[in-house]
Amino acid sequence: MTTLPLKDNTGENPSQRAQLILNHTSFGSVTDDILKGNECPKPPRSWYIALAISFSMMSMLGVMIGYLIFTGVGVWGNNNPVAWGYPIVNFVFWVGIGHAGTLISAILFLFRQKWRTAINRFAEAMTIFAVICAGTFPGIHIGRAWLAYWLFPIPNQMDMWPQFRSPLLWDVFAVGTYFTVSLLFWYLGMIPDLATMRDRANSKVKAIAYGIASLGWRGSMRHWHRYERAYLLLAALATPLVLSVHSVVSFDFAVSQLPGWHTTIFPPYFVAGAIFSGFAMVMTLAIPARELWGLKNFITTRHLENMCKVVLLTGSMVGYAYSMEFFIAWYSGEIYESFTFINRAFGPYGWAYWIMVSCNVITPQIFWFKKARTNIVIIFIASLLVNVGMWFERFVIVVTSLANDFLPSSWGMYEPTYVDVLTFLGSFGLFMTFFLLFIRYLPVLAIAELKAIMPEADPHGHGHSYNEMEGETDASAKEMEEGE
Amino acid sequence: MSSVNEPNQNNETGRTWWRSLDEAVATEETITTAPGEFAEGSSDLLATGDDRRQFLKIMGASMALAGLGVGGCRRWPKEHIVPYAHRPQGTMPGNPEYYASCFDFGGIAQGVLVTSNDGRPTKIEGNPMHSGSKGATDAFTQASILDLYDPDRSKRVTYGGEASSMSAFKDWAVEYLPKQGKGTAVICEPSSSPTFHRMQRAFMKKNPHAIWVEYAPLTNTNEREALHHAFGGHWVAVPDFSKAKNILSIDADFLGAGPMQVQNTQGWSAGRKVQHGAMSRLLMFETGLSITGSKADDRFALSPAGLLAVAELIAFNGTGISTIEGSVELDDEIVQLLKDEFGTPDLVVVGASQPAIVHSLAAKINERIGAVGNTVSYRQVANGSNATLSEVVAGMKDGRVTTAVIVGGNPTFDAPQELGFAEALEALNASVCLSYYNDETSQACKWHVNQAHWLEAWNDGTAADGTTCIGQPLIEALFGGLSASEFVAILAGEKVTDSHTLVQTTFNPNSDKWDPAWRTAVHDGVVANTKTIEKPPVNRKEMPLVSGVTASAQTVLFTPSPTVWDGRFANNGWMQELPDTLTKLTWDNAVLLSPATARALDVKQGDMLRIEVGGASIEIAALPVPGTADDCFVLPLGYGRKFEGRVCKGAGVDAYPLRNENMWSAPAKVTKTGTTYPLATTQMHFAVDTTPGKGAQDRMPLLYREGTLDQYNKDPGFVSHIGHVPHSLSIYEEHQFEGAKYKWGMSIDLSTCTGCNSCVAACHAENNIPIVGKDQVLVGREMHWLRIDRYFAFAKDSHGAYDGDKLESVAIQPVTCHHCENAPCEEVCPVAATVHDIDGLNVMVYNRCVGTRYCSNNCPFKVRRFNYFDYFRRDPLRSTGLLQVQPDYYVKTQSGGKTLRAMQFNPDVTVRMRGVMEKCTFCTQRIQRVKIATKNAWVKKTDAQKKADPRVAIPDGSIVTACQQACPADAIVFGDLLDEKSRVSKLHKEKRSYEMLEELNIKSRLKYLARLTNPVHGATVVEGAHH
């Protein structure tokens, strides 16, 4: 099917619902369209090129990790004042990216935000992969990686438990729980779609593989009933995790007594920042994906615009947090604390700080304008900048606080080595490899759920569905808005 | 035998692997018996395996021979002082033993007590019975143990670079050494050893025509010359700072590195304890910033000509007599101070860099003010020289000298450049060099004889006050080798040439080994009542009023390096990595200049400068140091060795090519080259006009608390007013230490600590701390458990901004683990690898550590050190290459090249692997040893006695940490805080005592005593030095 010209569905008319799926009037065509990328005998060449690049980067990650473990963490730039460098920056960065998945799947689901259905599947996939990337770093960053399992409360012959007051241990639990629940949620939501793929499989191998994965889904009323209960329950379970995982990650810093880390604002600030970066990453992935996989009818401009609004909100929250940190540092009258923040902005790492501020605080402000919110190029660039800015935010927090702490005698500078940089790039390879395999072999959008938000899914309209009332078109909504 | 086991001797430059020391020595004996790791025949038995009993017999015999006695490291010791046929009473394998010995450094014997662990000397302490040590040491003495186990040390006699043997050398000496010493020149290092001098006399008696020259680049020849004029004969000044109340120093860095550092520091610090509201005062005039200058109460940075002007001002009471070519204007402030305010000094000391006339003037002033016999005494020294080095070189060139004998020292490297010593020596057909390394001089000589380490041979010496010291060996010479006395004895054709007999004969020709006086002297390390300091005869001769000092625009100054001295410690990894107290520089030397001069030349730290003196020039990196006189360039000597040692290779720049005979300062031309060079400093420099630089200045008064004596006398509690701390609560329940028998604590006195680095070196030696190499120091991964923080405090200008040119004070602060009761590191460790013990020590469990490094992040003092690599398996240190992996990286070498280094390890301290965090333990191994002994003694007590001492109290002072033991200033005190009478308890209660970063509620067990200074204008300083 050729892609139809896009409709503008970004109008805001409270009396009507905007159309979330464009150019489709039958359920069948929705399935066809979404699974086109999976079912075509050969994916586009760009997919192969992207996979080749991603896979080589992932291999590079493997090489770097091997080198690291055989040689010692000294191959990184970490040093005495700055004992945590890139690995922890990357860890927090990836955990943050992984944040949007649960928010979209759980909280927006509970809030009945129907537009989420177009993006939740791959946002969740993104979450899983990002958390895998994130999880890699704490494991390899410790000095004796082969003993990483000591961080888990495993009964052992030494009768030693982990030290439960350490935020690093809380991290293990928080990230572990988050990963488990996200994975379950993702998988559970995928079961009806996997069954669809099973039913449409054109080879025995696929039929068997999807058959196993779909757990014998037959689409009976009872199945649907159980499925939706379970989904709702998991959504409710996952909701606190949205707040907990990044709060706990922020405890790594907030619980310590280092100026610049020891801040009570960290949990909400980290959560806002995580949502911010997560949504930016969803957009970064969605924009090329909808282009290449022909999903523009499902991930419409309206979806992107909504995400832009979330980015604007969370970006401003992050900006507020930045200014609040400064205010409290000054207000506390504590010389170490105030120095840390002045030094962040005007000290040797000032450049990183100003990259962070311009990317995270200034860039999203462009989304006050609807023209920017609906311009794909601007959205894409802004989302990339936000990703850069959020990485730098973690860099600023981790490195500048450590580099200049209490005793000036111990102050030092941190310079990453090539191993640091290649390991970080390699984690993108890991992420992208998983993501490319995902869009090829798994249902990239939630087919069943998408059908449920089509007007056709609601035969008992009560005047709220699209096209039921006169003049209810996107064009008329636009006109109304402009007329106001 | 597989090929792996065959000794690899085919190249000199590559790494050679040995299974044992014997193989490394490769004497004929071992080569013929090799492959002979085990006793003869045992490998056959192993191979056939049919006669187990025979095998066990042989192995049993080998074990009985190995590891016993002084010669325990050699399997078949040839000579026994006290043979261990049976285990002597009182010795216990695994328990260290201590032997007194002495270490000759710069012509003065340092008294030491050496720890021996099962036959391996592992640690050097000061000898409490030695007058110059009183139990303390300097950093060089601490580090000299590492030289013993240096894999680069020379292991054999060579001729023309080819392996030869000791017997061949002895034959040569008998046959070819010119009769009557015609054309023979002997160049030796200054030595305090009576035996050496006895052998010298024997040699000169046999070779009356020989020339004998004593040469060392850093000998204080100007003082010798001045005192020779003054008193006749050869004298050295021995000041006693403990008695001095008003000390005036003209460029005398008496607290800095040098042979008398320990006793000077002890004396000076004794006068710095506030007694009845008084303490001594030190006024310092100097060119570069020295540690003495940094501890002075008033200090002025002057050019060499300015210093001379000061000396003349004092000596001639401002009558205007001057020997300076060119004009020098002294600040009114200085004139005023010297005239009225400072009053009469009761001791004037002058540095080696000053011309002879200044030493002469100082001697006169000291006499005038009645210092002689009171705060300064003199000691007559032997002078063996009958010529000068320049005469020897001239002789070499014109053929009068045909044979050169060099006994220690390294003149090829450090002789005055104008002489052309190296070329002249190389041209000789007959030359012999006794040296510890196959160094520059040895390579220029035909014969090289390997020198024994001072711990490998008997020696004796003379302390600064003239006391005779006896030094016994701790180990059989690992690679053969001769002591200097033995070497000269051989050349003199003596019948008996073993060091033991030589030294004993010097002591008393009639003494045998059972002589109680000899046994007492060996045991004590000193011969009682042999002090020879005296009040010399009055001035005899006036010196001509000539100084040769020119007031020049750019002046270069040569100083000894506080880390490698004249270059002799250049291959010592501990010294190379020891951060210089004031510059914090490791692994290199640099030209030190004032920040203003650096600005004028447009250079920053690490920019290369070309320095021209006369016709010679060198290029060296610049390092601005506040407090240096403007337009003066301080060049530490001793770096840039050409000897290919694995440690010294490529470290620093050789400044000797600029230096002429006895030259300490010279007019120079300094230009910027435009290239840069990385300097590995352990503290980063932040200019005061940058955000971090200003931040550092702002917080300094809180971290390093100081005040003047007047301030203290007015309000002894002034220290606590510098930073007020609200009552804080902990989120977690704090340690209660219920049932604790002891409460360990430490106190460090910032008033007396001079930053001499002795504690840092001692900690290195005691705790098996690795050195990491320059590349790792550059990224900030040095491993010192104890470090000395140095801050420069600057005055504020009229706008309230700090002025980086106005140095107000220098803070020197040793920092180690504070053993916080509410330790921030413990809370964040996810695996409980760092925990508290009941006595309040914050202990590190290496086995449990996985290396998250979170503890280091949360440590406010940043005293935790992380093993980023397996530092003990990275070798050589300086070239790690792209892969950073050494060929031996994965190989656990129980034998082979690492064994020698491993012999130094303290068996009571774990050697840490990579990926593990480590830090100061308050020397827990020492605590445990005393605790166990005390408890064992307690158990044997009667019930009544036990009842009287339920706590099993440990007597105060019986546990001494390594840093405390080494400290010559007595600034570090360790002990039990539960014992109200212990020194540390009293010091913690002193009003000067403060806790660094107290506001964090960490409750540290280490408290500092604020620094008190006694400046002339002290009374005018009201509130804190920097507010």
Image: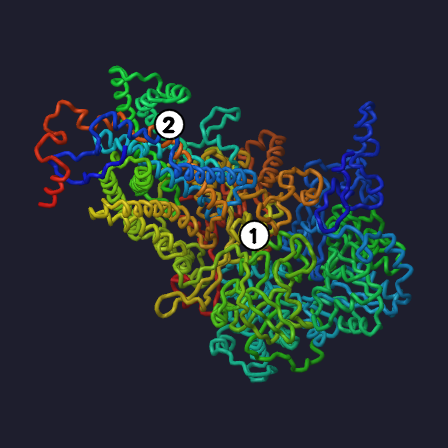
Marks 2,1: beta carbons within 8 A? no
- From where the camera sits, is residue A483 visible? yes
**Residue, disc 1:** B775
Dot 2: few (<14), some (14–19), or many (≥20) neighbours within 10 Å? Answer: few
Residue B503, image quadrant = bottom right
Left or right: A464 in relation to A450: left
Say which amino acid is labelled 2. Answer: Thr
Left or right: B364 in relation to B328: right
Query: Where is B775 relative to B673, above or below?
Result: above
Dot 1: few (<14), some (14–19), or many (≥20) neighbours within 10 Å? Answer: some
The residue lying at 12 percent from left, 38 percent from top is A13
Residue B618, image quadrant = bottom right
| Residue placed most toward the observer, B752 or B873 | B873
The residue lying at 22 percent from left, 39 percent from top is A6
Callout 1: chain:
B
Query: Where is B112 relative to B832, above or below?
Result: below
Mark closer to the observer (2, 1):
2
Callout 2: chain:
A
Q: Which mark is residue A180?
A: 2
Left or right: A419 in relation to A339: right
Say which amino acid is labelled 1. Answer: Asp
Q: CA distance from mark 2 to mark 1?
A: 43 Å
Query: Where is B485 relative to B821, above or below?
Result: below
- Residue at the bottom extreme? B320
- From where the camera sits, is residue B754 visible? no
